[in-house]
Image (cartoon, coloured by chain):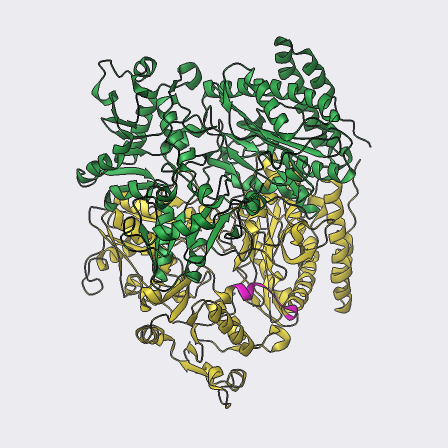
Chain colours: A green, B yellow
Amino acid sequence: MSPKITTELLKQLRQVMKNPRFVQEPVQAYIVPSGDAHQSEYIAPCDCRRAFISGFDGSAGTAIVTEQHAAMWTDGRYFLQAAHQMDSNWTLMKMGVKDTPTQEDWLVSVLPEGSKVGVDPFIIPADQWKRMSKALRSAGHDLVPVKENLIDTIWTDCPQRPCKPLITLDLSYTGVSWRDKIVALRSKMAERKVMWFVVTALDEVAWLFNLRGSDVEYNPVFFAYAVIGMNTIRLFIDGDRVMDPAVREHLQLDSTLEPEFKVQVMPYGSILSELQAVGAGLSPKEKVWLSDKASYALTEAIPKAYRYLTPYTPICIAKAVKNAAETEGMRRAHIKDAVALCELFNWLEKEVPKGTVTEIVAADKAEEFRSQQKDFVELSFATISSTGPNGAIIHYKPVPETNRTLSVNEIYLLDSGAQYKDGTTDVTRTMHFGTPSAYEKECFTYVLKGHIAVSAAIFPNGTKGHLLDSFARSALWDCGLDYLHGTGHGVGSFLNVHEGPCGISYKTFADEPLEAGMIVSDEPGYYEDGSFGIRIENVVLVIPAETKYNFKNRGSLTFEPLTLVPIQTKMIDVNLLTEKECNWVNEYHQKCREVVGAELERQGRHEALRWLLRETEPLGRVE
Amino acid sequence: MSPKITTELLKQLRQVMKNPRFVQEPVQAYIVPSGDAHQSEYIAPCDCRRAFISGFDGSAGTAIVTEQHAAMWTDGRYFLQAAHQMDSNWTLMKMGVKDTPTQEDWLVSVLPEGSKVGVDPFIIPADQWKRMSKALRSAGHDLVPVKENLIDTIWTDCPQRPCKPLITLDLSYTGVSWRDKIVALRSKMAERKVMWFVVTALDEVAWLFNLRGSDVEYNPVFFAYAVIGMNTIRLFIDGDRVMDPAVREHLQLDSTLEPEFKVQVMPYGSILSELQAVGAGLSPKEKVWLSDKASYALTEAIPKAYRYLTPYTPICIAKAVKNAAETEGMRRAHIKDAVALCELFNWLEKEVPKGTVTEIVAADKAEEFRSQQKDFVELSFATISSTGPNGAIIHYKPVPETNRTLSVNEIYLLDSGAQYKDGTTDVTRTMHFGTPSAYEKECFTYVLKGHIAVSAAIFPNGTKGHLLDSFARSALWDCGLDYLHGTGHGVGSFLNVHEGPCGISYKTFADEPLEAGMIVSDEPGYYEDGSFGIRIENVVLVIPAETKYNFKNRGSLTFEPLTLVPIQTKMIDVNLLTEKECNWVNEYHQKCREVVGAELERQGRHEALRWLLRETEPLGRVE
């Protein structure tokens, strides 16, 4: 991976920052956030502006360019990757590391007095705007919206915004019709006394209408907004996609419906003017509900007194709690995914010793096996197929320049997942195809202990996920080890592999309490720069737990693993496990045998079945 | 405990809420917060306005009175107590319980349109003012400062503000002179480019000047403010206390000092006008540093553009990290405190079976034994001496109406501590003087497991205390149990028994990272309403931990118990402990024997020594 040379681009950007064709007044700094106008984590190529200007293409990062400086803020997952991808024009700002300045503090320290800091108001979330604007103002500077995106002005070969066909999902997948979702949403709106709700996140639009798309790689979403009134439904979407008879039928566009369920289709680009019209027509006490992460541009369209902003929308919260149809779909998807991985690992076991399997070959093979499964749509994120030192780059993606050959001498880490029409998967396994060292086994076993500590945790109803994060680290901490990322994220149902409002992280305190039906990942790790990476990840479902007592009648919760892929016992130092942990591994493997074994049998995949049976032999504790 | 009859008082308050002598415009609601003008947790009798109006005298609670309603917000520690102490005029708002409205939401739901909500601007912290004012404004109401405290206008026999003599502390206690503390403070001010620092918390004034007082029960503080400039020191304090030669000498009031170390003494009541004068005389870029918890009145004295507000002041953070002199003092204080408790428990063991020891008698006896120790000053909080069902009232204080006799049939919980000139103690032990039931032992053992899990935890440098909270609950959660309070608080050095900025709680995310030298409590519990309460509390010192590895060279921390009082082995179900936990108990008891045993021997307290030796016999594990 050689860094992108950005000298000329930065020069051009600094020119447009002063060019009256694009800015009312010259801006002394320009902020390039990660996201798109929907604050998506995964973005379309046309929205990869921060990667274009800097070369750094990780999923999280904010670039700020001033006359003199260019700086990139990113978190621990990406320190190595960003350092590799950016040239010497850029300063890496390691978030979460002591003494790293915040963007605001850094700007204040480098800007001349009375500076203007520009940003695209469609790209910056309203809450970030507010925080940054306040900090800058108190230091005598101004945050200003720059209507034309300045990166777009210098990006001569910027790709087109995608506009791919839609997929309709019937009740067997979604469990609830879009009409019933609208009814439930309106009842939440009535509770909070709001008249309008603006849907800005792409996965929320998709979930609400039981539609999926493929405008963004890995996330089955499509570019759209929606504005839901108590009696109106407006869907802002481009192209002839709604001319598809299946979509028209699904949305009942040609039926005579009660007016409050009539979907009005409008151009994607008209959202701002339509919202401004809504804002202008409000009577006193008529509020408009928006996420506080909606863009500054859309938030400003509603006069301040009429805004009702919350960190999580009612759709985000409803979407997180999976219903029976969705849970069953997720189970099916995970069984199929396990079949694919059993095939892969069986294949790798045979092929790796030959020295011909590279990280890219292995990733492609994983995709090939997954694509053989029913209702496979695409991958759910870029496969992290990494061996040896590449495993320590937490969100590594193999490219030809870094592509390493798997061997019997190095640890192999595979973090991969897929979108099936019935569910989304995300699983990490760390394997050794030769003989792991005692140290590698020791580290792996600490990570496993952390994984089990979360997976087997019992906790009261109403507990927020961040309260479980330390359980995942305790065994590592005891030996002075740790990992610089969170422990888990919410997972969508044939939707985004990362979704709110729940998760397991030391960083997030604004998470919503876990409740039965939520689905999160459990993925502690350990990474040694230059040597290896270890991570063990299952997707787990929050379920009620039976306990001996029931304090204040609150009820308890625990997790059920949906991922059913063997955890390599060769990597486990059994003597470091407690009896309870040992039993957990054996029971987990027994379930893999029964459930995935039956499916392998049904699909006639006998060699992979034999591999599964071999890999799930019970652990023997050395007493 | 019978409730206070408040019908007449509420009537009077509602009258003054409309009386133009006291309010510019009638207020439809009046807020009575817990604190005083320094946002103290423990307050002088003249500041107990919330208790006066409602009858509820717990340490935390906010009363709001409207034309129709009177409501009290408090947390889980006080649900039972508040319900007992308030009459039917009051509605109890259980904070932390689902569906309990916030104060703002409740006000919005009950107030007529366009209401005014009054509050004393000296009593409400600026950050609370801001939050509440914003919420009310967005619902069409106004938060207004009412200069004269309305409770004071109806409180005819309100006591005088105390003004007791000061105690000077020399270097052997404080480790650092007040001059050096001022120098360090000014260097922090220079770092942040502020010209003035306003000291508003009473313990911060006391710590900065190495002075102590006794204006407030339990907290060795005195009513004062200070304003520190880069070249000036102003101390706002009343009475002839600074005429005491020891104080004059200590503050070098009569010496010819460099002007920047000359302490100007000013009347307590002049703080607002002096601060307004400072505010009026500021040049551009001259900032004034205040805690964001300083009162609204003082915060408003500084024009907004000149304020520099932080959640924790540099004094609060410096004060939390104890130096060698303070740490040694805390060790000495805890050994003396353990001697007193060994005497007490030995005495109780003999006396309880006679049926003559009440909760009050036991509390008084504990104070008697403590007062025999060197440098004893006073108790550090109201002793919680509770048996049987009273133990379930988390912050119970025995009064004649509730005073219960200790017996061999009930669990006894004693949470007590003292102020010694060399340190502050706070210890809870739960004892049974007969034969505990299997269920009581089971619950006690879960609490003990939680206590050990925190005390023995190893965690990276930079970890915030709230990340350790779940360790204390895990064993309880496994069985469906929990407790409704945090796990630990910072402890002052001959200062407030509760202090920031560190702690161990699921509620606090704004805590500062733990570092070596900080001192916190570790006090999980379990409470069964109407039956019993269990809590095990040690004060622990944060110390560096030796670990096998050292990830990113960050270093690790752990805790050393300063409290050295036996944990009753009779209450432990040894079969529920792991081998590691069993060893922890045995090593802890061995240390109690060695350290406290030697002191008991030195003090010639042979009977208590024999009790200590008996109580610290090693646990035998039944295999």
Boundaries of the magenta span: B317-325
Q: Position of residue A434 (x, y in %)?
A: 77, 30
Residue A42's place in the image compared with A300, above or below, is above
Left or right, A162 with reference to A410: left
Is residue B528 at least partly visible in the picture?
no
**Residue extending furthest toward the right:** A623
Query: Based on the displayed image, in which of its 4 quarters is residue A36 positioned?
Result: top left
Q: Main secondary structure of the magenta part?
A: helix
Left or right, A429 with reference to B201: right
Q: Quadrant of the C terminus of chain B?
A: top right
Query: Which one is in front, A174 or B121?
Result: A174
Q: For residue B495: magenta?
A: no
Is residue B181 at least partly visible in the picture?
yes
Q: Position of residue A56 (x, y in %)?
A: 51, 43
Query: Which one is in front, B330 or B129?
Result: B129
Query: Which one is in front, A24 or A198?
Result: A24
Left or right, B150 with reference to A63: left
Query: Which one is in front, B422 or A493?
Result: A493
Point 36% across, 60% down: residue: B126
Q: Position of residue A95 (x, y in %)?
A: 52, 50
Q: For residue B318: magenta?
A: yes
Q: Position of residue A1 (x, y in %)?
A: 58, 40
Residue B131's place in the image compared with A249, above or below, is below
Residue A473's place in the image compared with A218, above or below, is below
Q: Tally the numbered discs.
A: 0
Query: Based on the displayed image, in which of its 4 quarters is residue B553 positioned?
Result: bottom right
Query: Based on the displayed image, in which of its 4 quarters is residue B338 positioned?
Result: bottom right
